[in-house]
């Protein structure tokens, strides 16, 4: 995205989206001006996490105020939308990383997707998860800035712009409110997302519901699904043909806040036709080559599943029903 943009500074303490007319602008706090001018306060992971917390709150205000004042574009497939706010927010996030983390790799929904190695810090950015919700005026909208280093969560950021909140996890620490209110007992609730009723994804969900006498947590936002695992709204989650910018940030939060509570995996079919299930986090270097190859194709990695650690039969059932009702192929 080409930007005609003046950054916030102490003489002009306003933060706004590039290429919007009239400008979508919010007052820039002293903290936002400081991290935009100078980046993190030092070289520590905690300082980087704190800067991303401030940045996420800043772009979140642009998103919140932009809801209802949108240019909407349809992407490559029907019902797949992007707005001028998505594009502008991703540009802002990328610009900040370009200035202060130039050696990191970035995979973004609305921009270039870098290839990366096992030893790179890689950031998966979704500027607005739940774009349909955003267009329709729903509060179920999230910002994702999720990262991995050597196959494990590095820093995980989920913004809730309509609620004016953000949550950041890093090195067993957390910034922002922790939405953990895990339920005990009760019927099984499984989260997933799909666009249209009557689709293969729809039939897959109902087959799984029937098999486990479960109910569905579906809010048209994978970020909200991830938070649903933390709040007790859902017990499990799955997403066929997932893209990493959809899942890495919210599931990184879950992995860091609830260590050992969930089994998270990716199931996929490589070129030789075998079915492989590998950890979502903690995979070996061979997985990186597969991810890079998928990003060169259509960015779909495979079936992502998150199940309680004590329910391996649920993971196997989800894999079986996805195979039967649709396909594990991407």
Image (cartoon, rainbow, N blue to C red):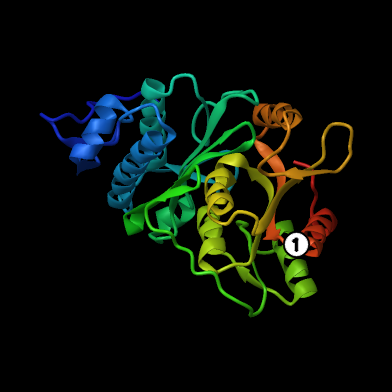
Query: Label 1: which residue?
Result: 204
Picture residue at 43% right of the left edge, 24% below the top: 101
Establish if 257 lies above or below 110: below
Q: Is residue 96 left or right of residue 241?
A: left
Residue 141: x and y in percent read 43, 54
Establish if 45 lies above or below 157: above
Q: Is residue 267 left or right of residue 65?
A: right
State whether residue 304 appears in this view.
no
Establish if 6 lies above or below 283: above
Which sits in the foreground, 270 or 201?
270
Q: Is residue 262 left or right of residue 71?
A: right
Residue 193: x and y in percent read 61, 58
Residue 29: x and y in percent read 19, 41
How many numbered discs, if any?
Answer: 1
Residue 199: x and y in percent read 70, 59
Q: Quadrant of residue 10?
A: top left
């Amino acid at each position: 995205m080409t930007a005609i943009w003046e950054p916030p500074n102490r003489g002009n303490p306003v933060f706004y989206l590039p290429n919007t007319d009239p400008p979508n602008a919010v007052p820039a706090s002293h903290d936002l001006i400081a991290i935009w001018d100078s980046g993190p306060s030092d070289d520590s992971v905690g300082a980087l996490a704190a800067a991303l917390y401030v940045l996420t709150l800043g772009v979140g205000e642009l998103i919140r105020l932009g809801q209802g004042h949108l240019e909407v574009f349809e992407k490559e497939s029907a019902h797949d939308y992007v707005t001028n706010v998505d594009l502008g927010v991703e540009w802002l996030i990328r610009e900040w990383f370009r200035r202060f983390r130039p050696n990191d790799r970035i995979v973004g929904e609305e921009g270039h997707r870098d290839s990366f190695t096992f030893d790179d810090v890689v950031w998966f950015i979704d500027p607005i998860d739940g774009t349909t919700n955003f267009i329709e005026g729903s509060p179920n909208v999230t910002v994702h800035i999720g990262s991995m280093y050597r196959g494990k969560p590095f820093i995980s950021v989920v913004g809730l712009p309509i609620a004016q909140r953000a949550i950041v996890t890093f090195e067993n620490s957390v910034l922002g409110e922790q939405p953990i209110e895990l339920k005990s007992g009760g019927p099984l609730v499984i989260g997933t997302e799909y666009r249209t009723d009557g689709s293969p994804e729809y039939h897959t969900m109902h087959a799984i519901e029937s098999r486990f006498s479960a109910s569905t947590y579906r809010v048209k936002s994978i970020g909200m699904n991830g938070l649903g695992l933390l709040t007790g709204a859902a017990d499990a989650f799955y997403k066929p043909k997932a893209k990493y910018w959809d899942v890495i940030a919210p599931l990184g939060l879950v992995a860091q806040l609830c260590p050992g509570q969930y089994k998270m995996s990716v199931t996929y079919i490589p070129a030789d036709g075998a079915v492989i299930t590998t950890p979502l986090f903690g995979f070996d270097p061979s997985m990186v080559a597969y991810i890079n190859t998928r990003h060169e194709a259509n960015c779909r990695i495979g079936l992502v599943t998150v199940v309680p650690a004590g329910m391996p039969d649920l993971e196997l059932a989800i894999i079986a029903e996805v195979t039967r009702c649709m396909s594990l192929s991407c």
